[in-house]
Amino acid sequence: MQVLIFSCLLGASLLVTSCADISPQRPDAPHWNEQVEQLSALTRWSAHGKLAIRTEDQSESANLDWQQEGRNTHILLTGPMGLGATAIESDRNTLQVSRNGDTQTFDISSAGAGEVINGWDLPLQQLPFWIRGLPFPSAPIEAQVFQQNLLQQLQQQGWTITYENYALFGRFTLPTRVTIERSNTRARIVIRSWSDFSS
């Protein structure tokens, strides 16, 4: 009986060890040109996860709920940031930030427009593209690194965007871990789910 118990425990130990050595693999993706065409045609989607921001002066995090409808972006940030709920609306021309009953509207292309959220210098025009694993189409690409037909790193407008992981959601291969950084600003986005797809 003791031999049987020992054998079972040894087998279970080996199974756990072998599973621990298995790294998550990136899903198969179409050719890069097909990936760009497929995701560029995606006009409506939702993403849910977490956002962590670190600057020279602060480090904060929030729950992230993002809804995209064509050019219109709606982002809701909630959580232990000391901000209360912050709603961000944009049509890629104007930026509207609502927090604690106060709403402010800005020209999104103006210098430092992103800093009104809480001093965060984030590229709000580019984010709807970068978060999907696409370059921003209205600016030159400084550098691109690919792995298995997917962007691993992108440099654009002085920002470095690193894609640490992807997953398959429906028929779309989309990022689940993205880091966006420039100078003293570093944003890390972890997406648990993508949904509500429409072309």
Image (cartoon, rainbow, N blue to C red):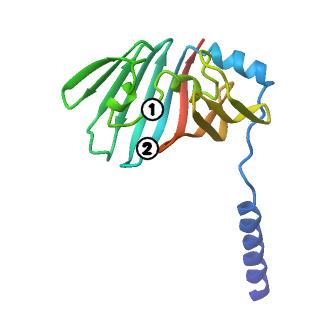
Q: Secondary structure at mark 1?
A: loop
From the viewer's perspective, is 184 left or right of 16? left
Instruction: Give the label on residue 130, or none.
Output: none
Q: Residue at x 47, y 45 (%)?
A: 184
- Residue 42, by quadrant, is top right
Q: Secondary structure at mark 2?
A: strand
- Residue 138, by quadrant, is top right
Amino acid type, mark 1: Leu
Residue 116 in percent (x, y) is at 32, 30
| Mark 2 vs 1: CB contact within 8 A | yes
- Residue 91, by quadrant, is top left
Q: Nearer the viewer, residue 189 or 135?
A: 135
Count all numbered tags in the image, as a single digit. Answer: 2
Spatial separation of the CA atoms under disc 2 and disc 1? 10 Å
Circle 2 residues within 10 Å: few <14, some 14–19, many ≥20 = many
Q: Residue at x 62, y 35 (%)?
A: 175
Residue 3 in percent (x, y) is at 79, 86
Q: Residue at x 37, y 20 (%)?
A: 89
Amino acid type, mark 2: Ile
The quadrant of the picture occupied by the C terminus is top right
Q: Nearer the viewer, residue 25 or 31?
A: 31
**View extreme (left): residue:** 101
Residue 92 in percent (x, y) is at 45, 14
Circle 1 residues within 10 Å: few <14, some 14–19, many ≥20 = many
Which label's residue is closer to the chain start, 2 or 1?
2
Residue beneath label 2, please? 53
The quadrant of the picture occupied by the N terminus is bottom right
Q: Residue at x 73, y 41 (%)?
A: 26
Residue beneath label 1, please? 122
**View extreme (bottom): residue:** 2
Q: Nearer the viewer, residue 5 or 101?
A: 101
From the viewer's perspective, is 18 left or right of 117? right
